[in-house]
Image (cartoon, coloured by chain):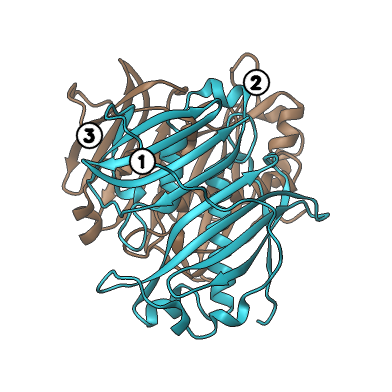
Chain colours: A cyan, B brown
Amino acid sequence: MSQLIGTYPFTIDAYLTDFRGKATLPQMSSFILQVATKHAEERGFGYSAMTAQKKAWVLSRLVIEMFEYPQNDALIQVRTWVTGINKLFTERCVSFETPEGRRFGFARTIWAAIDMETRRPTHLTELDGLARYVCDEPVPIEGVRKIQPLKTTEPVGKFTVRYSDIDINGHLNSMKYIEHFIDMFDMDLFRHKDIYRFEIGYTNEAHFGSALRLYRQEESEGIYVLEMRKEDTLISSARVYWK
Amino acid sequence: MSQLIGTYPFTIDAYLTDFRGKATLPQMSSFILQVATKHAEERGFGYSAMTAQKKAWVLSRLVIEMFEYPQNDALIQVRTWVTGINKLFTERCVSFETPEGRRFGFARTIWAAIDMETRRPTHLTELDGLARYVCDEPVPIEGVRKIQPLKTTEPVGKFTVRYSDIDINGHLNSMKYIEHFIDMFDMDLFRHKDIYRFEIGYTNEAHFGSALRLYRQEESEGIYVLEMRKEDTLISSARVYWK
């Protein structure tokens, strides 16, 4: 497979949409993970190739901007390409398009590769083939902005990591962080507004049985910073932009 | 579309599997909902056709038997067909197969159609076209067995229904019941055993903000009855067979 950009069709199934009949943010992020997996696999640096080298891809940061959310039964195309690579990180971008090519959302994702035994980062420049796929297709959204630690010590929610939260690497699944974060908001917000931008940083891993606490602070009107902590350790932080 | 049986291919994406690299029970049930949606839609009695008549399909009971769970990267085929219809219910069956046609799991599902305004059941015999698709393809698993109400009043867990739990009909999503139920089990069970049969009855609807309690009782060795209640009202019950 030699094309730089991979294009994958999806249907927004009614049973996957929210109460408004719109695809959810975790659903859109699941498309991102699916196309990342397929694009990498088809080009020889996917899950199986990594496992054979005792390495695993780890999502480090993600930003999504949705100009609109697709409705149930919509056909969409999700395109993805690699935009950069350095010693420790590679950036992969994603566009969401109608079948006619109208772009209604974008994402930028930053990945590291870890050694599955030491759990330490490995050098991406040693990864055979990856550099060959770097592509200069532009992506018209800003990368993740720095998220300053919150000062609040009053949690607004909590949950315990269960079987369904855990992925094949034994950690809290990347999509589930997003699900737990957006579930901190009341239905009323979803009735009147949409999340048009969402940034998340995956700082530390969380495992089965971890008791996590959720924190929230409004940074400016309609913009919230969220945190997930295990005792005093930051697991993940996010910034949510409503409009 | 005139074939009675619909066949749909899926890939078990690594990011969807559990910590063992196996597809999860909620994932298998999501395939069931996806193929039910597609099969019905393609034959003129799907979500859009129902909405146009102000009706909605409601899943009433589901039983799944998995002889084995597919591993990540596996290609599978999911086949579905309608096996019966009476005034209030229709039965749809599902088989899970390898691309070579080896069957490794089955499901039977019972659906009702409700009037979206009155929320009362509507007569399925009035539904144009549905009866034409009834098919006598056999399904070699027993239907849902009666689940007697538990006597216990001591919950073993609880959760509040959030945005991500709610489907397009405004209720707790059918897949999410299953997720919440199987999350009542410890990881150790998943390390050593598999759920080979799962039965669930959807008794009452649950809405955003509902505080639900979870109950569990071992019926006989490896067989558990689970309940989800909102105060004294039974929302759903399930029976889980481990081996």
Provide the residue designation for mark 2.
B115
Whether discs 2 and 3 lie on one chain: the answer is: yes
Q: Where is residue B85 in the image (x, y as percent from the top left)?
A: 61, 36
Q: In this view, does A118 lie to the left or right of B77?
A: left
Q: Where is residue A181 in the image (x, y as percent from the top left)?
A: 43, 38
Quarter of the image with the C terminus of chain A is top right
Whether label 2 touches label 3, CB < 8 Å: no
Q: Of A227 and A26, which appears nearest the observer?
A: A227
Whether discs 1 and 2 lie on one chain: the answer is: no
Q: Is mark 3 on a helix, strand or loop?
A: strand
Q: Is mark 1 on a helix, strand or loop?
A: loop
In the depicted structure, whether residue A150 falls above or below residue A87: above
Provide the residue designation for mark 3.
B216
Q: What element carries label 2?
A: strand
> Which of the two discs, 2 and 3, labels the residue nearer the N terminus?
2
**To which chain does the residue with label 2 belong?**
B
Q: Residue at 59% of width from left, 53% of height from top?
A: B80
**To which chain does the residue with label 3 belong?**
B
Q: Of B69 and A135, which appears nearest the observer?
A: A135
Q: Residue at 67% of width from left, 40% of height from top?
A: A69
Q: Where is residue A34 in the image (x, y as percent from the top left)?
A: 55, 60
Provide the residue designation for mark 1.
A149
